[in-house]
Amino acid sequence: MSQGKKVRDILIKHFKNSAVKIIVSPNGVEVHLPEGYDESKVKEVINKYEPWIERKLRELSELVELSKQLEVVNRSVEELRQLAKSFADQAAREVLSISNPCKIVVRDMSRKWASLSERGVLTINKLACYLPDSLVKYVIYHEICHFLEKKHNKRYWSCVEKTIPNYKELESKLRAYEVKLKTKEALTNLRVLKS
Ligand SMILES: [Zn+2]
């Protein structure tokens, strides 16, 4: 299907309880619709979000270029867990001035590199087995800083910056690794539309 002046393939999928979503991934542009949604309205939705789609496609092609230069590390799950634990020990001392309060768990995660639960379980994505040490460190420090501030606000990022001054560069490197490692369904950009 092509839309407006831009000729582009857009895959439309219907899901039972889906919201209207546009997904831009290395595989192209997909629109997810709830069952029974009038497909003739899709053109309108696409036109409305055209600048956003264009921007995301540009960002994505930059990430694909960057991802070609990235080296993939090969660790076992246990090696990752040990490394994550040593960074968590270090981060807890540096950021929180306490000994490490976290239990480290490695598992498959679909949308995140890591998360921190209320009870202090720090879960890290199994895909991090392939990341260089510097990014595993960043992912762990990122979560430890959430002990001080849950939201990604100014206060939070200034906490991150104190120990990881080049965090912005590391954030985009992480996204490039995501593109490299999740070739099939890299959901690097997903937006829920209110239409
Ligand atoms: Zn976060």
Image (tube, rainbow, N blue to C red):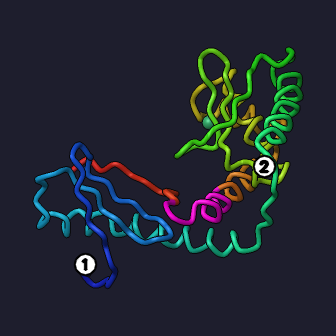
Q: Residue 52 appears in which quarter of the rendering?
A: bottom left
- Mark 2 highlights which residue? 135
Q: Residue 64, position in %: x, y? A: 62, 72
Amino acid on which disc 2 is placed: Leu
Note whether 99 is above or below 78 in the view shown: above
Residue tagged by mark 1?
A: 3
Residue 84 placement (x, y as % from top left): 81, 36
Question: Gap between marks 2 and 1, in whole Å?
Answer: 39 Å
Which circle, 2 or 1, is nearer the viewer? 2
Task: Please rate how many residues cluster around mark 2, counting C-alpha atoms within 10 Å: few if below 14, some from 14 to 19, many from 20.
Answer: some
- Label 1 residue SS: loop
Q: Secondary structure at mark 2?
A: helix
**For residue 139, which quarter of the picture?**
top right
> Residue 57 at x, y = what percent?
48, 71
Residue sitting nearer the eye, 151 or 7: 7
Q: Is residue 81 above or below residue 178?
A: above
Q: Is the residue marked by circle 1 packed among few (<14), some (14-19), or many (20+) residues within 10 Å?
A: some
